[in-house]
């Protein structure tokens, strides 16, 4: 299907219910019971990740769209024929209509029964991320694009047709040394933060960047892959945020043209940004970039 606000909200609701039905109430239900594994990049994956991705693929695609999902792409082989076919598929995905999905963003906090994780759905047309939707089920928040607006619902335990939607205002732009900065795990492990601001590293790009949407944080510094940001990037751009890599390149919704992602399917860093990036309102972005 094409992006439709009500339909995508319904899919998110069903996805949350699926995850809830598969996850127990105790941390051992995931850590020990249903199990988790370490992927080649050191990140965690549970049995629920691919199950939710398969559900989202079934609900979102009808044969006319491509589908780029974290778990299915990670499972692709690296043989010569595998790479050739994947290159053709990626080119088709950039030329046509494509859903870009992270079934659980922040699997590590999810697996440890911490609430800082989310579901991300991005809708890309001819290489441009036109619309997006994210849900933070344990925090009771859901965000979707609708036209030029970003909509937020907080009563997501109710049936989806009873959700109360609010238009998010554009956050103020201006540096404040007391405001929160959210950080990606890779940045936190490898860098010192040259600010006295309070910082938070939740292990989920969806959660971190949603804090910018709501005004709870002033900037984000981190390194992400395409599916981590596909759902939230259209929202950030609608609310006046800018995204710039430390190498100077700007990231917009135009994934294909900007070449800020490594899209070489034979590369070990495929789907990742080519450098750490900063996301903030323009004047805050300039200040943060000047210090890094």
Image (tube, grey):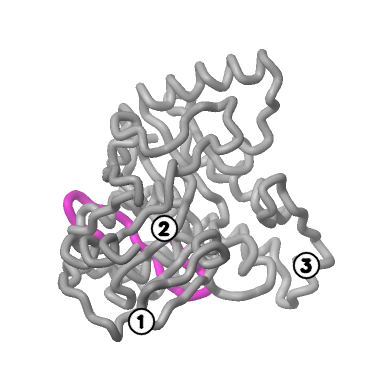
**In the image: residue 71, left or right of residue 59:** right
User: Is disc 3 surrounded by few (<14), some (14 to 19) or many (20+) residues within 10 Å?
Assistant: some
Residue bearing mark 1: 197
Q: CA distance from mark 3 to mark 1?
A: 33 Å
Q: Nearer the viewer, residue 271 or 232?
A: 271
Disc 3 versus disc 2: distance between alpha carbons?
25 Å
Q: Circles 3 and 2: CB distance less than 8 Å? A: no
Identify the secondary structure beneath mark 2. strand
Q: Residue 256: horizontal and vertical position, in percent? A: 34, 30
Placement of 171 over or under 246, stated as above or below: below
Q: Is residue 79 magenta?
A: no
SS assignment at label 3: helix
Q: Nearer the viewer, mark 2 or mark 1?
A: 1
Residue that numbered label 3 is attached to? 31
* Marks 3, 2: nearer the viewer: 3
Count of numbered circles on the image: 3
Q: Residue at x 59, y 25 (%)?
A: 266
Left or right of residue 205: residue 115: right
Residue at 38% x, 48% y: name it. 7
Q: Answer yes or no: is residue 152 visible.
A: no
The magenta span reads 135-152
Residues at marks 2 and 1 touching, judged by CB atoms closer than 8 Å: no
Q: Is residue 155 left or right of residue 27?
A: left
Instruction: Name which of mark 3 and mark 2 comes first in the sequence.
Output: 3
How far across and down, in percent of the image, does residue 197 sit?
36, 81
Q: Residues within 10 Å of mark 2 (few under 14, many from 20)?
A: many
Looking at the image, is mark 3 or mark 1 earlier in the sequence? 3
Residue at label 2? 134
Residue 191, above or below 138:
above
């Amino acid at each position: 299907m094409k992006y439709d606000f009500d339909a995508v909200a319904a899919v998110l609701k069903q996805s949350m219910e699926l995850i809830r039905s598969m996850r127990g109430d105790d941390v051992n239900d995931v850590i020990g019971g249903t199990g988790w594994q370490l992927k080649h990049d050191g990140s965690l994956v549970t049995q629920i990740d691919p199950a939710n991705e398969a559900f989202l693929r079934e609900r979102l695609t009808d044969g006319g769209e491509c589908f780029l999902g974290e778990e299915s792409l990670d499972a692709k082989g690296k043989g010569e024929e595998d790479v050739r076919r994947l290159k053709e598929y990626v080119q088709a995905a950039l030329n046509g209509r494509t859903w870009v999905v992270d079934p659980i963003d922040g699997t590590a906090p999810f697996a440890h029964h911490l609430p800082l994780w989310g579901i991300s759905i991005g809708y890309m047309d001819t290489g441009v991320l036109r619309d997006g939707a994210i849900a933070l089920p344990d925090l009771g928040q859901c965000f979707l694009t609708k036209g030029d607006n970003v909509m937020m619902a907080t009563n997501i335990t109710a049936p989806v047709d009873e959700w109360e939607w609010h238009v998010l205002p554009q956050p103020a732009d201006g540096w404040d040394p007391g405001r929160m900065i959210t950080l990606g795990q890779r940045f936190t492990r490898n860098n010192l933060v040259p600010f006295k601001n309070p910082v938070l590293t939740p292990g989920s790009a969806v959660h971190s960047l949603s804090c910018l949407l709501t005004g709870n944080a002033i900037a984000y510094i981190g390194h992400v892959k395409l599916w981590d940001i596909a759902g939230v990037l259209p929202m950030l751009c609608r609310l006046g945020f800018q995204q710039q890599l430390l190498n100077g390149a700007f990231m917009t919704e135009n994934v294909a043209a900007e070449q800020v992602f490594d899209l070489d399917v034979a590369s070990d860093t495929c789907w990742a940004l080519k450098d750490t990036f900063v996301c903030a309102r323009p004047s805050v972005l300039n200040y943060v970039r000047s210090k890094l």
